[in-house]
Image (tube, coloured by chain):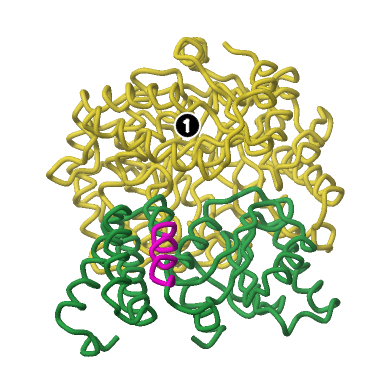
Chain colours: A green, B yellow
Amino acid sequence: METNQFSPEDKALLDSLKEAIIALDDDRAAAIAEEVVESGIDPKLAIRYAITDAALVLGEKFDAGEYFLPHLVISGDLMDAVTKILEKNIPQSETEKKKVIVIATVQADVHSIGKNLVSTMLKSVGFEVVDIGVDVPSAAIIAKARERNADIIALSSLLTTTMPYLKEVIDDLVSMNLRDRFKVMIGGGPVTREYADRIGADGYGRDAIDAIDVAKKILSL
Amino acid sequence: MITLLEIAERTQTGEKIEEKKWDRMFFETISSLVKKYGIACPAEHCYINRDDDMAARAYEAAIDFLEAMGIYCITTHRRVALTREEILTAIREAPTEILMGEGRDRRIWKQRRVEGQEKLNVCPGHHTPFSEDLAGLVVSNFAQIPRTDFIEGFNFSHIDGREIIGAPMEVYASRRQLNWMREGVRKAGRPGLAVVYYPINTRAEDLIGVMDPEQGLRRTDGILLSLLPDLKMEQDMLSAAIVYDEYGSFKLSGSFAIIGGFCGGIEGAIIEGIAKPIAAMIAYRDYISYTGVEHIHMLNGRQILMPHVNWGRSVVNQALNRFSHTICMRWVIPTSGPGTDLCLWEAAMQAVEAPVNGMNLYAPRHCRTTMNHGQTPVEAEWMIAVSDAVIDQGMDRQGADALLDRIAGRFEGQKPAAGFDITQCYDLVHHQPKPEYREAIDRVRAGLREMGLRLDG
């Protein structure tokens, strides 16, 4: 983003916040976030500059093999905490609503690592991710998506025999007249783009990095 | 060894822990042990570990890790705690040889030694989807490879023309899988050859429903019961382990660690990679494991070569073979598909690596396998030939490392090749590769000979 809207001092402060997040230093990040609030910097711009940029760097570090899944989990929690501090002075009505993704591994499938990776990567780039775990029946996935007014339902399947449950969720959405309300993206070891097209999913992610682009694309972000 | 009943009770009575907390503990504990034991990649890149002290330290770290963590039951969200004595007793009492199969097809699958000179045991194929029309024929082709010691089953999405969904259809499909396997080995003239059930799902009914001496799983056959990543177990798998322990079937486990998961980087993955097959031995009585470390970028086919992954894998397998009774296999997962030069080069690399690290060979298949597009008998026969040449030449770790470095040169600037369906590059009726694939084999064989490997044929 354009940085000329900040004074040199403010920019230095925001840069140090970004660095603290990337270094996963939660105490330092929280302290700097408080300083940002006191300095009067527009919190929305601060979030966009520091948090969004930090998330991109974290994603690059993961892709490069420098950071791993636990780092992303820690950074996700850290960015949540920093955002809450920065949002203190924003009236509730002006708080930017994050896009919500409900994610699950489908019924009869207990594999979690791919789903966890996607969940964490999506969180790191600013989505609100509601991870409802593994072996989740279609009805429970749809109920959670409705409860959280989700924008996307993201589904994972590692087994050939649980792929039909991906289709079941989409079919249930159709039969409940909810298909237009949620975008559906799918992924997992045996899942292919052709299969996603065949069952009427809106997006297919080959891996966790790909999933970010897919989520943004299907929401036109 | 601690009984499976005791394990079952601990899954019900152990400390209750949220999975997220377990994941964090996993990372924190493994990170501290990486530091404590000085686990680190060598400064100069190499494919095979030659630092025996490193393997010894990694093994100690893994035992500490297992003692500190135990195993997490995802069904009950409880920790199955293990004492050091229980862990060491299990390691000591586990067998180093498994008898499998019947009659003249009976085989002994053995633990190998680092730089051991015995020929490798081989499971040539499956663990990949095949369509119903090809199923019996494919099994028969893999069973016709003379060195085949057992064959693993495969998964599929349809049965009798219907998409499989729900437990009853899964049970039916599981039984059909075993029917095809038994029929395939009979047609190959090897009715007693051991088959291993590849679970098409992990429900207890799917796992146990295949038990059938006449048409399904015999006492001399096996079943794949894998631990999940991050030392996680399931009660359905444990139920099956209890049943098959009494029935007599042997059990296998997928026990590699994934770099980038909650174990962290390569150093943490080495510790998990050693601890996991030992945990599988304790939790499910898995005495044969495909072991090592893998990287997500290679599992999803984004990168062909990552030398530190080969090195990490060698540390894990050397440690397990030197200090434990874990029977190790190399699960070969080329990033390129069958029918291509690159697939053969990748498979060759791992067939050079396996014997010097003390591993047997297990089911080579394309990392992004899809229906009928994962493997042919060629890759297995090729790997047998390469690993035999490595042993016949008396290659040690240093020699293997130098050869791997030369092979790696072939991958520079290359991207994984998609490859072909089995019927496009292999003649299942005449049990031979199609001419184009034969030419690829000849090219890669010539290339390996130029590099100094004395390959026959």
Closest to the observer, B388 or B50 = B50
Which residue: 19% across, 51% down?
Answer: B406
**Magenta: main secondary structure:** helix
Closest to the observer, A26 or B253 = A26
Which residue: 21% across, 89% down?
Answer: A4
Which residue: 49% across, 48% down?
Answer: B364
Q: Position of residue B125 (x, y in %)?
A: 56, 45
Q: Is residue B409 above or below residue B57?
A: below
Q: Chain of mark 1?
A: B
Q: Position of residue B127 (x, y in %)?
A: 60, 47
Q: Is residue B235 above or below residue A146?
A: above
Image side of residue B366 versus residue B431, left or right: left
Q: Is residue A80 magenta?
A: yes
Q: Is residue A46 magenta?
A: no
Q: Secondary structure at mark 1?
A: helix
Q: Which residues are magenta?
A: A76-88
Which quadrant, please, contains the N terminus of chain B?
Answer: top right
Number of marks in the image?
1
Residue B104 in view of the camera = no
Q: Where does label 1 land, which residue?
A: B276
Q: Is residue B280 above or below residue B259?
A: above
Image side of residue B329 versus residue B74, left or right: left
Q: Is residue B433 above or below residue A110?
A: below
Which residue type carries mark 1? Lys
Residue B324 in view of the camera = yes
Q: Position of residue A16 (x, y in %)?
A: 21, 66
Closest to the observer, A182 or B60 = A182
Q: Position of residue B282 (x, y in %)?
A: 56, 21
Quarter of the view holding residue B75: top right
Closest to the observer, B217 or B199 = B199
